């Protein structure tokens, strides 16, 4: 699939958010691999200090510098950066105030924690600013260093506040470097080159948070990207069997006969009861998924579905998810 066939042609900053537990970091990593396929350079940025990227790519904890962590399908490189708030603040002080030495002294005295506690908007400016700088960075020949940047962003409940840094620093600075830096960040975040993607599961709470989060972004004029449905459980029974299981109408005697025909005669009746109960649970989950998927279908945004990986997420699984995103036009 060529770049012109993707939903996000022209988008250079992909912000990935979602309710805790939906696999946000996994999806961000898979998206970075998908975007890098075919010879592109992509930076994957982590801003929450959890070292989730290092765990996914099975590498040592990432330092505060850009490191290559993977080679994408058909060539292309994925680099990763775990943004350290303390180091980023020192870098910020050096860049705008020429206070690197003072910044290190502040760090030792715990002033960094004090500053980011009383002025959390400044912390978000620093974190989003580091990512925005990577988006805008160019080589001497004028080409971009990175073809795309993927940010593993904070959860849905905080994403609007995190990205809307201009509003967050309005009480801190009306003019000066902080204000100017926030305005630069907002020019990147609000541009057509940015898309905020929501990761969800087909469960009531994650879907509701996705719907609420999308509306909040729209209310403040921030760009909504796509909805990525993660870990979809495929139905294991046909429609007729699902309906029978949900209604408790599975023929236990038929199950017993099937078990005995397969050579499982010992405790066949007990096994049949367990299988019937599991079938009923599966039917209820399948119905829940269908209902939540219908709620998401009303959204006017592209949607992508990623399967549940039965063996869990490892490096091979990340490549499988990246392939799924590419096949659906996400990259």
Image: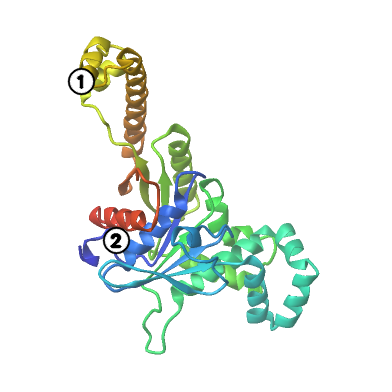
Q: Which residue is mark 2?
A: 331
Figure label count:
2
Q: Secondary structure at mark 1?
A: helix
Instruction: Kindly identify the residue that appears in the image at 32 percent across and 62 percent down.
Output: 34
Residue 229 seen anywhere in this rendered image of the structure: yes
Identify the mark at residue 122; answer none if there is no mark.
none
Assign the N terminus to one quadrant of the image.
bottom left
Which of 47 and 93 lies nearest the eye of the viewer? 47
Instruction: Kindly identify the residue that appears in the image at 59 percent across and 60 percent down.
Output: 49
Tell me, yes or no, whether the two marked residues, 2 and 1, touch with CB atoms within 8 Å. no
Which mark lies nearer to you, 2 or 1?
Answer: 1
In the image, taking residue 120 as reference, residue 38 lies left or right, namely left
Residue 190 seen anywhere in this rendered image of the structure: no
Q: Which residue is mark 1?
A: 240
Q: Secondary structure at mark 2?
A: loop
Disc with the residue nearer the chain's start (2 vs 1): 1
Q: In the rendered view, tell whether residue 165 sits above or below residue 130.
A: above
Structural crowding at the residue carrying mark 1, measured as other residues with C-alpha within 10 Å and reported as few (<14), some (14–19) or many (≥20): few
Quarter location, residue 297: top left
Quarter location, residue 286: top left
Q: In the rendered view, tell whether residue 299 sits above or below residue 180.
A: above
Instruction: Kindly identify the residue that appears in the image at 35 percent across and 43 percent down.
Output: 310
Q: In the rendered view, tell whether residue 90 sits above or below residue 3.
A: below
Alpha-carbon span between mark 2 and mark 1? 37 Å
Q: How is the image coloured?
A: rainbow
Residue 98: give x, y in percent of width and height.
69, 84
Which of 35 and 187 lies nearest the eye of the viewer? 35
């Amino acid at each position: 699939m060529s770049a012109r066939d993707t939903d996000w042609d022209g988008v250079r900053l992909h912000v990935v958010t979602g309710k805790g537990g939906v696999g946000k970091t996994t999806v961000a990593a898979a998206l970075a691999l998908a975007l890098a396929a075919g010879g592109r350079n992509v930076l994957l940025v982590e801003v929450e200090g959890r070292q989730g990227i290092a765990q996914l790519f099975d590498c040592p904890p990432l330092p505060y510098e850009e490191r290559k962590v993977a080679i994408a399908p058909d060539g292309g490189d994925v680099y990763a950066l775990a943004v350290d708030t303390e180091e980023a603040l020192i870098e910020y002080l050096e860049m705008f105030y020429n206070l690197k030495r003072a910044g290190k002294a502040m760090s030792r005295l715990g002033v960094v924690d004090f500053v980011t506690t009383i002025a959390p908007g400044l912390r978000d400016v620093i974190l989003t600013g580091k990512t925005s700088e990577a988006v805008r960075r160019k080589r001497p020949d004028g080409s971009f260093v990175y073809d795309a940047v993927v940010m593993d962003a904070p959860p849905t409940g905080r994403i609007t506040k995190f990205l809307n840094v201009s509003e967050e620093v309005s009480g801190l600075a009306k003019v000066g470097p902080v204000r100017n830096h926030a305005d630069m960040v907002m020019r990147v975040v609000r541009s057509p080159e940015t898309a905020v993607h929501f990761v969800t599961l087909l469960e009531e709470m994650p879907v509701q948070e996705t719907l609420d989060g999308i509306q909040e972004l729209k209310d403040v004029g921030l760009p909504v990207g796509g909805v990525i449905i993660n870990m979809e459980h495929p139905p294991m029974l046909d429609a007729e069997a699902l309906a029978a299981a949900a209604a408790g109408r599975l023929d236990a005697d038929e199950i017993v006969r099937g078990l005995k025909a397969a050579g499982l005669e010992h405790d066949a009746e007990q096994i049949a009861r367990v299988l019937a109960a599991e079938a009923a649970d599966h039917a209820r989950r399948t119905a829940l998924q269908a209902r939540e998927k219908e709620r998401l279908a009303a959204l006017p945004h592209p949607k992508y579905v990623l399967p549940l990986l039965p063996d869990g997420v490892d490096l091979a699984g990340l490549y499988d998810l990246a392939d799924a995103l590419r096949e659906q036009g996400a990259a």
